[in-house]
Image (spheres, rainbow, N blue to C red):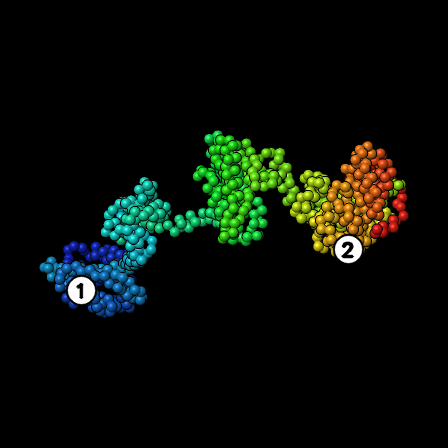
Amino acid sequence: MPSDAGSHPHTLNPVGDGGLVDGQDRDKLCRLADQAPVMLAYFDGARQLCSYANRTFLQALCDPRRSPLGRALSDVVDPTLAQPLAQALTDTLLSGQTLTLEQPLVLRDGQQRWAEITLTPHLDPQGGRAGVYVLIVDHSRHHAAERALLESEERLSKFLQAGIEGIFFHRDGHIVDANPALCALVGLSLHDLLNRPALMLIAPEHQVATAKRLDGQEDTTFETAVVHQDGTRIPVEVIDRGTLQHGEPMRMAVVRDIRDRRATQARLHFLVHHDALTGLPNRTAFLAQLDHLMVAARASDTQLALLFIDLDHFKRVNDSVGHTRGDALLKTIAQRLCACVRSTDRVARFGGDEFMVLLPGVRDRDAVVRVADKLLDAVGAPVVVEGQSISVTPSLGIALYPQDGDTPDVLIKHADAAMHVAKGRGRATFAFFEPQVATAAYDKLMLEGELGHAIIHDEFALLFQPQVRACDGRPVGVEALIRWQHPQRGLLAPNEFIALAEQHRLIVPIGTWVLREAARQAQQWHAQGWPLTVAVNLSTLQFQAPDFVDMVEALLTRTGLPAGWLELELTERMLMDDVPQVCARLQRLRGLGVKLSVDDFGTGYSSLSHLKELPIDTMKIDRSFVQELPHQRESAAIASAIVQLARGLGLSVVAEGVETAAQRDFLVGLGCDQLQGLMISAPRTAAQLQAWLAVQTPPPAPQPRPQSP
Ligand code: C2E
Ligand code: CA
Ligand code: CA
């Protein structure tokens, strides 16, 4: 590398025209030229030998070991440059004109550059060609950027042409370019679009809003609508961005057809808010409508009527005609409901066989009754499905806003409660919500739900009511009586839940629990020296269960209780249901050694001839007769007849519900064997019974098992 100490060894005086600069200035100029980030050189005119090169030129292009001075071009730079440059030198000298060329350049270190080379002729005062100034500017960076821009514009243009989304460029609100997709979207040619206002694409009612979005300089995305030439309005999403095109600031709008998206959204919205089978609004949608209409009713001070419709025994219909026909039935019912009401009323499917009808602006109850009647008729009319006529009746519960509830939840709950009241009244009818009635129905409903969990939660308990020998008052047995320790309602008596348990067949597991618990308890007393018979009440369903006898047998085996100490109480109705079958079952039980008694005797319709055939041990005189003893003659006559009948059949007699000494004395006089009632003891817990037993006359010697008559 040439040093720059002293005068510049790499320079000659190219400015040989004299007079313009003196030696000192020349030196300054050379130093200045060395600082320039461009390559400078001078070649004389005659032989085209280098007589000056600045430092950048030397460093970039020349072999450091050989000064270029006095050498020909081909000797100074790389041949790839030397060749075109030599030609250009000649041309410049010949033409006397400045010449510029763009040229790739290989630097001494092998780097590929892009250069702009300017050759300026040096004319002597006589007009002769003294030489040529060579100025080489490396503008690789600029060149690369330009190339990149060009390429990106080309690429963009390709995208624009090929894209399926409409794109247009706009400046000052006017379209300056558009791709084929946009042209297709609006049904216009590029020619039709160019230089026209961008808003011409937009549907009139969206123009003001869209103008605001397009005018701004910010990047923005919004939804609007364009209009096709054929008048079709197309919802679109517009993405508007600032950009450069051919180096000019511009805005580019991507116009995306969102018809499919809108359709999907609408479909989804429909699916979310409608019931797929009937097409009616579903629960979610209905709740929103109800809420909305309640607000409106409040504002306008009007009434709403909510009708909760439940089809009676729809499950049965479904099971018998099949689900496909059941579905067809539901569809028809949905249509009929809609046909019964005005367009301002609402109909919805709430669940499987539950529908809701909402009547806004009702004047009075009569108006609602008219609609309810119409709905009952419409739903109740037979539906012919695939040639088969199907009938189903609805039960309808009505709650009015505002008096029956001021939130959707409460109003629905009350309409539901009223519907249950209607069901309770025999179905195929309607009921208005009435707080007391509905509460009772609702309580029942709640209880139904809770009854299922009561066994698991160990909420049942047994009380035991003593039975004593009539002649001497000695305890001989107990009757097990169930109680439900309800977590909220406290101790519930059987009349509050047994019927419910029977309806839901829960009586079977509950009854099994009672038997097991009673047997376990009796076994425990036996172990303590109290050989008490334990009497257990049976319910029909339980007794009819095919495995009932097996269950009793297994239970006796498991608890180890001698069968003779278990007594099963059956009602007259249970005995008369299907006499041969009942008889067989009783025989099997009797075969096990279990005792059998007829509860509440005298209240049912036993056929005396059948009674004779049944293997019964005991009759229990119902307490309704006992209560009126001894003064009421009819009761006295019945009690007396029962005792005689039992005697005749060889059965023992228990009188229940004995409350007074007079009753006791009368019954003892009739010849009753055992007494049970408040006079002796109320039903007791096992512990209370034990305490009671402790103060009684010691237990009698174990009774011999009664023999079958
Ligand atoms: P039940 O079999 O006639 O039982 C006698 C009922 O009379 C019991 O009522 C008892 O507490 C009540 N009682 C006893 N002595 C007197 C008295 O001197 N005066 C009056 N007024 N009443 C008296 P409870 O416990 O409420 O049982 C009612 C009914 O529930 C029972 O009538 C029975 O049919 C049924 N039951 C009770 N436990 C069960 C059970 O475990 N299973 C089934 N299936 N039914 C049961
Ligand atoms: Ca009983
Ligand atoms: Ca009874």
Say what amino acid the circle numbered 1 marks. Leu
Residue at the location (26% across, 45% down)?
A: 197
Q: Which amino acid does label 2 sit on?
A: Arg
Q: Mark 1 points at which residue?
A: 89
Residue 250, relative to residue 418: is it above or below? Answer: below
Q: Position of residue 307 (x, y in %)?
A: 53, 38
Q: Residue drawn 83% across and 47% down?
A: 649
Q: What element carries label 2?
A: helix
- Look at mark 2 in the image and give the residue it sits on: 588
Q: Nearer the viewer, residue 707 or 566?
A: 707
| Residue 455 x, y percent position in the rendering | 70, 48
Q: Where is residue 487 in the image (x, y as percent from the top left)?
A: 69, 41
Quadrant location, the N terminus: bottom left
The quadrant in which residue 686 appears is top right
Q: Are marks 2 and 1 in contact (CB under 8 Å)?
A: no
Q: Is residue 653 left or right of residue 418?
A: right
Relative to 385, residue 488 above or below: above
The local crowd at label 1, few if under 14, some if 14 to 19, many if 20 or more residues have their Cα within 10 Å, is: many
Q: Residue at x 76, y 49 (%)?
A: 610
Nearer the observer, 374 or 275: 374
Any part of residue 445 in sight = yes
Q: What is the number of the mark on residue 137?
A: none
Residue at image position (13%, 60%) is 96
Q: How far apart are marks 2 and 1 (CA)?
A: 133 Å
Q: Earlier in the sequence, mark 2 or mark 1?
A: 1
